[in-house]
Image (spheres, rainbow, N blue to C red):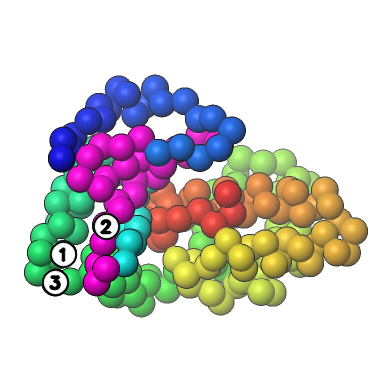
Amino acid sequence: LPSDKLTELGVRKAKPSSKPKKLSDGRGLFLLLHPNGSKYWRMKYRFMGKEKLLSIGVWPNVSISEARNKRNEAKQLLENGKDPSADKKKQKLGLRESHGNTFGSVTSEWLEIKQKEWKTSYFDDVKRSIEIHLLPDLENRAIADITSTEILTVLKKAEEQGKLEAARRLRQKCGAIFTYANLKIYCENNPAL
């Protein structure tokens, strides 16, 4: 199968559409382009007869050459009878244990940065909203393990209280926290998208 079809320029210029779209690089590697413009490297593979998906990282943090290297490493693991996703989970667990990256600790880091950028009144509103709606359920969860279902459940609670606009803003802030976590390599997915 042909591989290395994508170019750095092509990836940079790739425009989002109303639905997520895939740009194939070959040998299972592709770039997942979200409607909001986020670009995620993924690798499709089969293990024990099942089709699986490996998250490789976010572009531009992970360049094409890095993504290809990770794909090649994953292919090597497959040849040795190992599941790349399981191997990655083990590595991620080690990373998480050493850093203790809970949603609460990452949110604190993110808020510290935003405090310097935002007006005090706006910062206080955002912080209070996060403390009321997000932290009770998510504070002690490892950020790499949080799923989109968990995020939706938390946002639904705010909606059920009649706070539709607050829920919409919370989703945006949640997305920004996960984008920050992606950049710091605390996690690779953004379940708030």
Q: Is residue 131 left or right of residue 73?
A: right
Labels 3 & 1 near each other (Cβ < 8 A): yes
Which residue, given by chain and number where applicable, does mark 2 sit on?
45
Could you tell me if residue 97 is visible in this image? yes
Which residue, given by chain and number where applicable, does mark 1 sit on?
78
Which residues are drawn in magenta?
A: 23-49
Residue 81, numbered label:
3
**Mark 3 → mark 1, Cα distance in angstroms:** 5 Å
Image coordinates of residue 50 in percent, x first then y, are: 31, 67
- Crowd class of label 2 (few under 14; some 14 to 19; many from 20; radius 10 Å): many
User: Circle 1 — which element?
Assistant: helix
Is 45 magenta? The answer is: yes
Q: Could you tell me which residue is drawn at 59 percent across and 54 percent down? A: 192
Residue 114 lies, with reference to residue 73, above or below; the image says: above
**Mark 1 → mark 2, Cα distance in angstroms:** 9 Å
**Residue found at the very far right of the displayed protein:** 162
